[in-house]
Amino acid sequence: MTRLDKLDAEALYAELLAGVRGLLKPDGVLVGIWSGGAWLAERLQQDLGLAGAPGVISSALHRDDFSQRGLSGGADHTRLPFEVQGRHIVLVDDVLYTGRTIRAAVNELYDFGRPASVALAVLVDRGGRELPICAACAPATIALPPGQRLSLARDDVGKFTFEIR
Amino acid sequence: MFVRRNPQLNRNDELIHLLSIEGLPQAILQHILDTAGTFLSVNERDVKKVPLLRGKSVFNLFFENSTRTRTTFEIAAKRLSADVINLDIARSSTAKGESLLDTIANLSAMHADMFVVRHSESGAPYLIAQHCAPHVHVVNAGDGRHSHPTQGLLDMYTIRHYKKDFRSLTVAIVGDIVHSRVARSDIHALTTLGAPEIRAVGPKTLVPGDLKEMGVRVCHDMAEGIAGADVIIMLRLQNERMTGAMLPSAGEYFKTFGLTPEKLALAKPDAIVMHPGPINRGVEIDSTVVDGLQSVILPQVTFGIAVRMAVMSIIAGNSA
């Protein structure tokens, strides 16, 4: 268990990079969940020397809290510049919590085709799962009270930090 | 102080019904247009369906006929995974003497979640919105001469798609403005979105001078009306106007206010031509203009589905 004040996004990114390198199948592709996961996928794509752009996916249209939260912004971000059908996909996100975002993002992915496999890689697993979902790669695990929000931030030069509210 | 609330908004100023564009803030209009952009891409996917309204029942209540509007609402609701029930209301309960509110009470007892209402009486959707259960949402699909907000919004989506920014545009609306709920909705939307010049173009019987009070420039001369315009919205000439002595003849009308390639040449070279449909070729618009490069009449139809998906999903996501 990592302590909150020891959470170093850049150090964890280096571990994530190594993890994703192992997870990615030869013709596999990266798909980042908007927005933090998309930033990570963008940098992973570069650091892994993959051609083209990674996929970006938004969970907004498949969220299960639509009736409480409505259609909040960000639904317009899904961009999958490749065939999903038959593809090995590594889904990337910044923080794994209840698992609901992942469920919604996987549903969204299926609107574009049937992938051969989907593996999940995240920077931090903060526990508190409400669905049977687990990450194949999660460099840090941390315990946080339910009210606290943890998310990735990116500065002008592309350096990652964590935002805790 | 007593402040009369906009009946379309809840206490947090979120949209719960769409009854009219009048009185809606710019941010809400922009939000609807942005959301429509999202759904436009959904309509191009393999699976053209998202589960936002799964398990919800949408009742299409068309007290006045309209195949196209009803169909686009039906497609929009189905692509949001709602169950859609079309009621041929004009020929059923109303014909047997049931009142509007009794019809609504009965359909509410069937667990309706949303009513899409077209009615020949202005204000009918307001009446329904005021009397239905708190969880029920109402969309106005055209009421009398008053308002046709989803058509207004899809027109705005079309203009934004081709012209990007409203704040430098000259928009000419041509034809029977006085009877047109589309014109009224367009004028309110364009004003809210900051279009600096809106012109109402047509004969004095169909474009009365007091339209100026809506902030539009009234032109009874076609050449003056479309000169330098970025957007030309042609309205359908309703045949019943011809018999009501408001116009001499269809041929005469076409000669003075019909949009021909020659008249279109007076507008900006990149002007777009719009029409809410159904088109009367050779009455208000020349066939070559309908099929010409500047016509965006068919894209309007495509955008209309996305805009209606946006409206239905936004109001369904907000509670009273």
Image (cartoon, coloured by chain):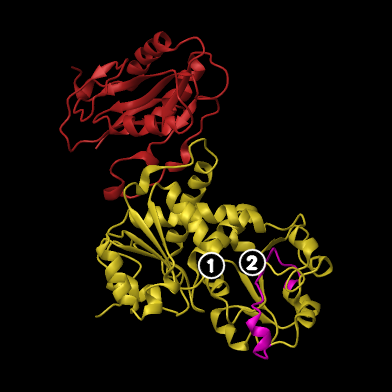
Chain colours: A red, B yellow
Residue closest to the eye, B43 or B9: B43
> Would you place residue B268 above or below residue B185 in this image?
above
Q: Amino acid at mark 1?
A: Ser
Is residue B78 in view from this perspective?
A: yes
In this orientation, which residue lies closer to the viewer: B116 or B308?
Answer: B116
Where is residue B96 drawn, in percent x and y? Answer: 37, 79
- Left or right relative to B53: residue A47: right
Quadrant in the picture for the N terminus of chain A = top left
- Counting residues from the N terminus, which is met first, the one under dot 1 or under dot 2? 1
The residue that appears at 59% across and 56% down in the rendered structure is B301
| The C terminus of chain A, quarter of image | top left
**A30 vs B148, nearest the viewer:** B148
Chain on which label 1 sits: B
Contact between labelled residues 2 and 1, with CB atoms less than 8 Å apart: no
Q: Is residue B189 above or below residue B213?
A: above
**Residue wearing tag 2:** B278
The amino acid marked with disc number 2 is Pro
Q: Which residue is mark 1?
A: B66
Q: Is residue A67 left or right of residue B164?
A: left
Q: Which region shows up in magenta?
A: B226-246
**Label 2 residue SS:** loop
* Residue A43 x %, y %: 46, 21
User: Residue B128's x, y, as percent?
Assistant: 33, 72
Q: Are marks 1 and 2 on the same chain?
A: yes
Within 10 angstroms of label 1, few (less than 14), some, or many (20 or more) residues? few
Q: Determine whether B307 is above or below A58 in the image.
A: below
